[in-house]
Image (cartoon, grey):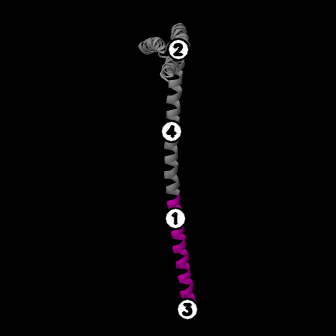
Amino acid sequence: MEAEVKRRKQQAERAALELKLKKEELDAAVLLSKQRGDAADSALKTMQEAAAKEKKELLVEKTKQPEDLKEKDAEKAKVNAFVAQLDKIISEGAVQQKKSMYEEAVAIFQKAADLAASKKPEYHFFKKNIIEREAMIFSNIAACHK
């Protein structure tokens, strides 16, 4: 009987140790979950702050748009007039090129390229249009040198 009591006592001690270990594991899991939750809350807060900042920047940008649109429209008119002027010079060079007067054509194309290069810094919104014309001019010059 004493052996039976001893065995049951050992079983109870083992069960108590297992319960204590499970409780410690559970406490550690709760602590880890809380830490993860704090990190997730912190990340969420950071994301919300970034979204609020971006929204504020968009609102500021929208308020600036009408001024930019006016400036862009004014520049568009200037660019269209300048591109028409360049096209006129390019067509004069093309006429010379068709007549096989390559030196004269190159001189005319070079005049157009210089004009485009000098005016390019004046335009902010439509600089692409000037660059496209420059590329066409240099292509024509290269064709004259074949």
Q: Secondary structure at mark 3?
A: helix
Residue denoted by label 1: 25
Residue denoted by label 2: 100
Q: Secondary structure at mark 4?
A: helix
- The image position of residue 137, as x and y in percent, is 50, 17
Q: Which mark is residue 3?
A: 3
> Upstream in the sequence, badge 2 or badge 1?
1
> Upstream in the sequence, badge 3 or badge 4?
3
Residue denoted by label 4: 45
Q: Secondary structure at mark 1?
A: helix
Closer to us: 41 or 47? 47
Q: Amino acid at mark 1?
A: Glu
Instruction: Give the crowd class for mark 1: few <14, some 14-19, many >=20 residues within 10 Å.
Output: few
Q: CA distance from mark 1 to mark 4?
A: 30 Å
**Numbered disc in front, either 1 or 4:** 4
Q: Amino acid at mark 4?
A: Lys
> Upstream in the sequence, badge 4 or badge 2?
4
Disc 3 vs disc 4: Cβ atoms closer than 8 Å? no
Closer to us: 77 or 22? 77
Position above or below: 84 against 29: above
**Numbered disc in front, either 3 or 4:** 4
Instruction: Give the crowd class for mark 2: few <14, some 14-19, many >=20 residues within 10 Å.
Output: few
Q: Amino acid at mark 2?
A: Ser
Q: CA distance from mark 1 to mark 3?
A: 33 Å
- The image position of residue 94, as x and y in percent, is 54, 13
Position above or below: 19 against 94: below
- The image position of residue 29, as x and y in percent, is 52, 59
Q: Amino acid at mark 3?
A: Ala
**Numbered disc in front, either 2 or 1:** 2
Residue 76 appears in the picture as rendered: no
